[in-house]
Image (cartoon, rainbow, N blue to C red):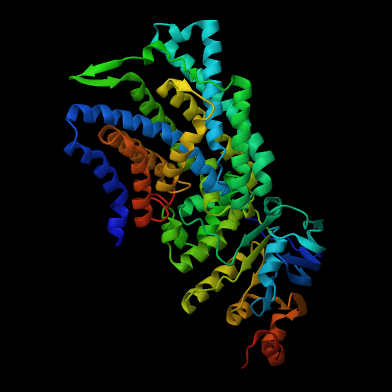
Amino acid sequence: MDSPWKKWFPTLMVFAIFLSPLLLISPKTYITLTISGLAMGMLLFLVASGFSLIFGLLSVLNLAHGALFTWGAYIGFTSFGLINQWTGWGGSESIFLNITIFLLALLTAGLLVALLGVITERLVIRPVYGSHLFQIFITVGAMIVLEELVRIVWGPNDEVMPVPISFMGSYDLFDVVVSKYPLIAIAMGLIIYFVILMILRKTKLGTIVRAGVENPEMVQVMGHNIYRYFTGVFAVGSALAAIGGGMWATFVKSIHPAMGGEVIIFALIVAIIGGLGSITGSVVGALLVGLSYNYVAYLVPKAALGITMLLLVVILSIRPTGLFSEGT
Amino acid sequence: MAEVEPVDEPILKVERIHSLIGKHHVLQGVSFQVDPGKVTVLLGRNGAGKSTTLRTIMGLLSPSQGTIRFKEQAIHHMKPYEISRLGIGFVPEDRGIFNLLTVEENFRVAMHQENGKTRERMETVFHIFPDLKKFWKATAGNLSGGQKQMLAIARPLVNRNELLLIDEPSKGLAPIIIDHLIDSINKLKEFTVVILVEQNFYMASSLGSDFYLFDDGRTVHHGQMEELVQNEELKKKYLGISG
């Protein structure tokens, strides 16, 4: 493949997936599905970006990431419930109070799961740095333990995720039904993406992390304690998984202990498609997966998961290291 | 950038170090010392243990025996980032460039602090390596081999490093670039003590004051570079060079 084609491949891929369903779906349905697909993509981005960043810097395939997503959803669920009990902000007519309680619940989930992530990194993952096989075994073990802990703390049954009042319902824009929450999810995802991107590109901390993704040994030789950065990235990756969990739960309006196991498969596909270690790759990969999943789920529901696998195979056969393997 | 103050004690003293890479006992008693104001060259055939010695000094490999002292402080038990912060810079054989980062970002990662003194040192860096200023915003991966080597050697100079370990800087470079590199390293001798690992005898003899010959993971001979230049027997026996 010559280099101009290689350079434009991610863009062409996005446009092909974005526009091709117009041949088969009416424009109104297409817009509804596209918004839903973008929202799903942005939520997947939150989970996949943490997974990808952890792999990029630490070279750790953290299969317990899905369990951290579940913990995020449950902590978000509990903290939303508690704050709402004290303040009643979730049921308030005020959009500002609705957004505040939603963000507080996500913040609590992010902080507590970041702490859980740090504990997991220190106790479980640090002893197996450098050995991918052991990492797979031990992180699958950690996933099972964390998932069982969710069952012990919150019980094995599904719970209904509370949603702030102003996040419910939909807008009718020129006869096109547009749900409110997907728009919020898209906006939140974009904000988080740009914040991460700015930190990685404009701060010294981010520059060191990017350098560490490329050559961790050299970062150490330049006087930086790479293990401190490993822990920090693990905490941020875990917090992103938790925020993704809380937002996903609000999207599907329910939580259950095995939800992380389902989402981690998507996150893995997204991270590989995007290029492990690349945040922009994660967002593009997530949007490709989210859109193609929604379009195909409408046209041929049983083929929805299959299309993401097909996407993975096609992209890897053309770009074995993913769409954005050359950086953030 | 301050000049290295002359002191009587060696700046670095390596005593009988042994190092293993996996099960391979690579260093089997390496001893040498580096005096201030000099360029000490480590010479030997491939696999003699020169690069492993630099990696061991830098803390990337832990010696199983022996001691390493930098300005009389034992450093053989320290982590690489602690050793770096003591004032030892390292330019590895593969240059260790962050190819996806710009030249500016490569320097930023290398800086221990960002203050007025760092900016002064940057001016010195630009004086020694003027080309780097031209490529300041360029992605490091797009630089030529010679420019990458300049960047690799220049990066540690942004800190107050008193010792610089440079591993095979001439590797893969054209002769004209090597001459340019010799000029640059000659200039930076004013600011830091250099330990140079080099296979290219022309470069080694152009820059070195003292030499240590390595063979099978041991230091087997040392002296002043002028002696080695004239000693055909030593060169043939340990470096495979004749004439």
Q: Residue at x 31, y 39 (%)?
A: A292
Please say if B45 is above or below A55. below
Whether residue A12 is visible, yes or no, is: yes
| Direction from residue A16 to residue B225 in the image, left or right | right
Q: Residue at x 66, y 69 (%)?
A: B51
Q: Give the farthest residue toward the bottom.
A: B243
Residue A264 picture location, percent across and down: 48, 38
Residue B18 picture location, percent across and down: 78, 67
Q: In the figure, residue A172 lies in which quadrant? A: top left
Q: In the figure, residue A239 lies in which quadrant? A: top right
Please say if B172 is above or below A172. below
Q: Give the farthest residue toward the front.
A: A302
- Compare residues A303 and B50 and report the one nearer the observer: A303
Quadrant of the rendering where the C terminus of chain B is positioned = bottom right
- Compare residues B230 and A160 and report the one nearer the observer: A160
Quadrant of the rendering where the N terminus of chain B is positioned = bottom right
Residue A181 picture location, percent across and down: 36, 21
Residue A228 picture location, percent across and down: 64, 42
Q: Residue at x 56, y 33 (%)?
A: A67
